[in-house]
Image (tube, helix red, strand yellow):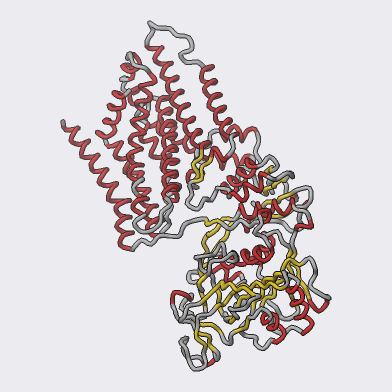
Amino acid sequence: MFAIFKREIKAYFRTVVGWLFIAAVLALYGLYFYAYNLRSGYPYISYSLSAIAFIMLIAVPVLTMRSFAEERHTKTDQLVLTAPVSLGKIVFGKYLAMVGVFTAAMAVIALTPLFLSIYGTVPMGESYVALLGFWLYGCACIAIGMLMSVLTESQVIAAVLAFAVLFLGYMMSSITGLISQSGNILTAILGAYDLYTPLESFMNGCLDLTGLVYFLSVIGLCLFLSCQLIQKRRYSVSTKKIALGAFSIGTIVIACAVAVGVNLVVRELPSTVTAIDATSTQLYSITDTTKDYLKGLNEDVTIYVLAAENGGDSTLAETLQRYEDLSDHIKVEYKNPSTNPTFYQQYTSEAPSAGSMIVVSEQRSRVIDYSDIYEYSFDYSTYSQSLEGYDAEGQLTSAIQYVTMDSSELPVIYEITGHGETALSGGFTEAVEKANMTLSELTLLTEDAVPEDAAAIIINGPSSDFSEDDAKKVTDYLENGGKALIVTNFEYKNLTNFESILSSYGIERVDGIVMENDASYYYNNIPYYLLPDVASSSYTTSVSGKYIFAPYSEAFSYNGESEDVTYTALLETTEAAVSKIDVANATTSQKEDGDIEGPFAIALAAERTVDDVTSQIVVAGSVNLFTDSTNAIVSGNNVSMFTDIISELTGGEEEDTAVIPVKEYTLGTITVTSISAIIGGLAASILVPIVLLVIGIVIWAVRRKK
């Protein structure tokens, strides 16, 4: 076998074919590498590899067309057919030579993640998993191309056949989708020859055993069929030997059955075994919190996905598969909206978007809209949005908890109204729902007291004062162990009764609006667009070390020596900050006459214990803190902090109501200088391919003259 491999590999590099193949692959990869990775700053080479998957349909036939067709055309195959050499070694040796040429191109591509790492953080695990997947995909394509070369003595026909067959495998997912989105026997049979779908898992950063086995099965089956086809001709040439079954249909059927059987067995294995999460953000991994919860799940839950099973979100499908594998009580069913357009009406009156999920138990149901699965940030400087977070686990675990909890276990949070309060934005109300709590409005004027079932209350930036009676209802609730999130608005001062609620905890509002004079702690060159320091506490668990955006904020002073109250600063400014008293006539953000010097606490928590009764409040000085527009500036961090606060106030840190935070979907972009991007792009897409092609031409020309 080694002699065959050595002869073939030399043949590829002594002619232009091998060099041309490598140059073509590298040239096209270089173009996308420049566009995606160098110019746009994406650290994922899987973007570039996915883009060049189609070139394999053209490049591979050029590489494989001569492997057997040329020898058959020149009759030199007679020597092979009559040689006392194992046919398997001949076929495998030729195949390895072509794989060697392809591997040489992949070896060069494998250097690009290392080059990118010079300019920033690159997900090496994901990069090399993507490279492995693309290499397996290329090896499978080569095996198919070689099989087509065995069928004919014309190199042109071999190349055309290879392209047609590879193109069919590349497009098979779309073809089966056109035949039936819900799937049937025909699509299941055709789907067995789907070359691209197994590649997607690798490109998404998942080391997929099912994809690995599939590609190896295709390779093994093609090599076996190549041997069988050559064997038929071999025995027709060697008339002195007669062997039954040299070209046995039965043997081929058995080989195909074995390949199909192995793949079916592997697909039945749990995803925790077959899929290794190689993503830097552990995108597909299920947290221990969810695992522990699902282990104790004893009620059946069905997750209906409003999408075709083979045409949905592959990332979400992987997550759902892991949920099914973790509990026998979880069942996932796909409902194609095209064939079941009214299915959702059993559970909701409003039509969810395509790809949404409906989580159902015997007690109740919850709709998870597809728009809530992914989290986007909006860049107001470029008016573009980018994908930042993946919240499938958080939404699913929350929904499963919700549909299986007893009604008495569902906390109620009351949002106080009637004093010009600002209503919570949609993203924050969704956060309350995700924490499996009910958000209800409460008008104190119409109630004798805060309801007993209140897990917490929210007072969000009142613009008019409370009545004495309303303020007393709140203080009575807190004295009995209540919890409250209170947000103030710097524009509305002298709210005496409202401020008495804060005063009972020794907290006073500082006059003016806070302006920061340390440029590292404000946004967009606007001193009152605060990016305060986030103190580490149980109220800021998921945002410690991250940015919180708190524009138009006022500060608080408090009695730090109180025996009954414990204070925890949550958001703090630097010493360079000042509170502007006369902001309308201010000429600078620096301290002027009458201004108050920092540092300031613009959000804090207070816990008061009197006669063994403990109450908690969290006070924030920016009414804009909990709005969707502000939250988008910091990629969802404000919602995360809000969730931490609500969970801490209501006791949501307990295991059965834990909130799974949003996972980062991608790493940040890398910064490549313009000159480096241009030089790297030219080298990758033009210089290196041309040099390789010139080397091949020179070697071919020199050998031709000899």
| Pick the front one: 677 or 561 | 561
Q: Residue at x 45, y 47 (%)?
A: 50
**In this image, 606 relative to 528: left or right?**
right
Q: Is residue 624 above or below residue 271?
A: below
Quadrant of residue 570 within the rendered picture: bottom right
> Residue 181, how many percent across, how many down?
64, 43
Position of residue 601 measured from the top left corner of the image (x, y, whole percent): 55, 77
Give the residue drawn at x 46%, y 13%: 246
Report the quarter where the C terminus lies. Answer: top left
- Residue 51 in view: no
Residue 167 is situated, as x and y percent measured from the top left of the image, at 48, 38
The one nearer the camera, 693 or 457, is: 457
Q: Residue at x 55, y 28 (%)?
A: 262
- Which image quadrant for residue 571? bottom right
Q: Position of residue 364 (x, y in %)?
A: 77, 52
Left or right, 607 with reference to 637: right
- Quarter of the image where the N terminus is located: top left
Q: Residue furthest top?
A: 240
Q: Nearer the viewer, residue 517 or 142?
A: 517
Q: Is residue 232 left or right of residue 457?
A: left
Picture layout, residue 172 above or below residue 51: above
